[in-house]
Image (cartoon, rainbow, N blue to C red):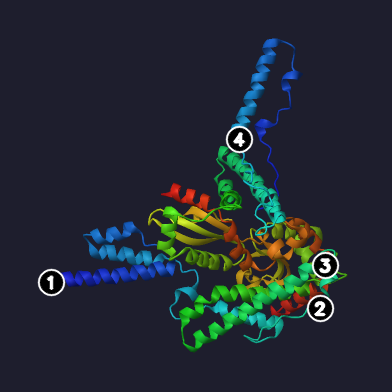
Amino acid sequence: PSSAASPAASPAASPAASPAASLSHDHSTQAFARSAYFHSRLVGARIRGCQKHTLPDLPYDYSALEPVISAEIMQLHHSKHHQTYINNLNVAEEKLAEAKAKSDISTVIALAPALKFNGGGHINHSIFWKNLSPDGGEPQGELLTAINRDFGSLDGLKSQLSAATVAIQGSGWGWLGYNKQKKILQIATCPNQDPLEATTGLIPLFGIDVWEHAYYLQYKNVRPDYVNAIWKVANWKDIITRFNAAQ
Amino acid sequence: MEGNSKMADLKDAYIAALEKKLAELSGIEVDQIKKNQLANAADEARAISEMAEYVASIQVEQAGVAQAGVVNPQIAAVYSHITAELGEERGAHVLPPMKYDYAALEPHISAMIMEIHHTKHHQGYITNLKACTEKLKQAEEANDVAAMNALLPAIKFNGGGHLNHTIFWTNMAPNAGGEPSGPIADAINKEFGSFQDFKAKFSAASVGVKGSGWGWLGYCPKNDTVAVATCQNQDPLQITHGLIPLLGLDVWEHAYYLQYKNLRADYVKAFFNVINWANVNERYDNARKSAGH
């Protein structure tokens, strides 16, 4: 599986830009040609699955999380890494739509890793940007009660999640998640871009990206410094919102 | 009556113990339907024999994991490959010195990357490997097989990291790169058609690693051929794919990010300017000899 984006051509979209113009001046023929052209575009769009994913805006400037996370990292992370997952997800979904239209089950299955990797990357980073904020407040209310109940204290949560996240071998994410069945908070880690909910069933509340691209330019190999610092920009308002929605 | 119900309890307990061990060994949860069948079966003998057939049909993937009281052979394998590469005995792991300056591979790989990669990342794997090895020794002295096997992921990760990076430094050199000559060139042409085809395949595989990992050119002792392969994280090539490592490319982000940022493909392309084909030939020659060719 290649990480380069190469948009697949959809057969229905191949008619030239304005076929209507190349036909006779007869009005009814033109009208027919125009409607046939637009119909073919619509059919093409339906086959492609025209809901393309787009990069969500960052809720703050690239420099807003300094000195915890540098502007350079935020800009590369958002406009390059996240964008690439989105581009590749769109390509994979287009290929998926074509394969489904042809009932090509083998291709559908072969696309699964690319969908998980790029779809997971899109999901995870979309959560991440909202999970961070220059003024995210503190945990309170029912979330704080749950934290004290499940981890002893906020410090207990921080030290456990930080330890688990630092210990990830290779690329991945550390998560504070919510277990809807047991109605408790839980810590989990996922490798690469495996999405938390699809992988474990836990509802994602707060994620820490520990792919090296998330911290290397600033923290180099010292992942623990990055993980310890990120708590200063945790957006507890967003985490509370997610916790409430998960109840 | 009481005797019958006690017998039923014992049977239930026995079956529960069997099912639990079965699930542990096979990683498969015993089918709830089968459980219900067993509970409801009028003909108990028939139900038991079906269960026995089901048990017999389960494929045990890794004998070392399935057998009780056996140390996973991968642990010894990691250390033996390190000894074969570096000559150092288990526990006596040190950072091998670079044969060239940190700046020697510029402009293809920056001095800053080389220095941090060697003195921080590689050293980190060695430090952690020594710590694991201490714990392994303690577990051995306590005859605690479970504790020993529990150390496998850390030993593979840190031992693999030490081994992989050791090979990597020798795979590169200043005033190197270009196209290979000698036996490895012949093997590459035979397997891939041409050097350019090999380069394209190796590059695509390395760029395509999802997350952290390595691209490899390895030697297959069984078929006397070379092959391109990738590994995740620090999984050692030989233990993972059975190939002897000849040429490795680290595609963890720490290997290129300071210089190439997200553009892994540019880094992979630049790598071909620093490949030490003399070293690859030497490894190929040794690998073939050790395989009896």
Q: Chain of mark 4?
A: A
For mark 3, what is the residue? B274
What is the x, y in percent for residue B278?
Answer: 83, 74
Q: CA distance from mark 1 to mark 4?
A: 70 Å
Which amino acid, by three-letter code, is at mark 2?
Answer: Lys
Residue B127 visible here: yes
Which amino acid, by three-letter code, is at mark 1?
Answer: Glu
Q: Nearer the viewer, residue B116 or B190?
A: B116
For mark 4, what is the residue? A50
Which amino acid, by three-letter code, is at mark 4?
Answer: Cys
Whether label 4 touches label 2, CB < 8 Å: no
Residue B251 visible here: no
The quarter of the picture where residue A170 lies is: bottom right
Whether label 2 touches label 1, CB < 8 Å: no
Q: Which residue shows up at 21% across the image and 59% down it?
A: B42
Q: Nearer the viewer, residue B23 or B54?
A: B23
The quarter of the picture where residue B281 lies is: bottom right
* Quadrant in the picture for the C terminus of chain B: bottom right
Which amino acid, by three-letter code, is at mark 3?
Answer: Val
Q: Nearer the viewer, residue A108 or A87?
A: A87
What is the x, y in percent for residue A56?
Answer: 62, 43
Same chain, marks 3 and 4? Answer: no
Q: Nearer the viewer, mark 2 or mark 3?
A: 2
Q: Residue furthest right?
A: B175
Q: Chain of mark 2?
A: B
For mark 2, what is the residue? B99
Q: Secondary structure at mark 3?
A: loop
Q: Nearer the viewer, mark 1 or mark 4?
A: 4
For mark 1, what is the residue? B2
Q: Chain of mark 3?
A: B
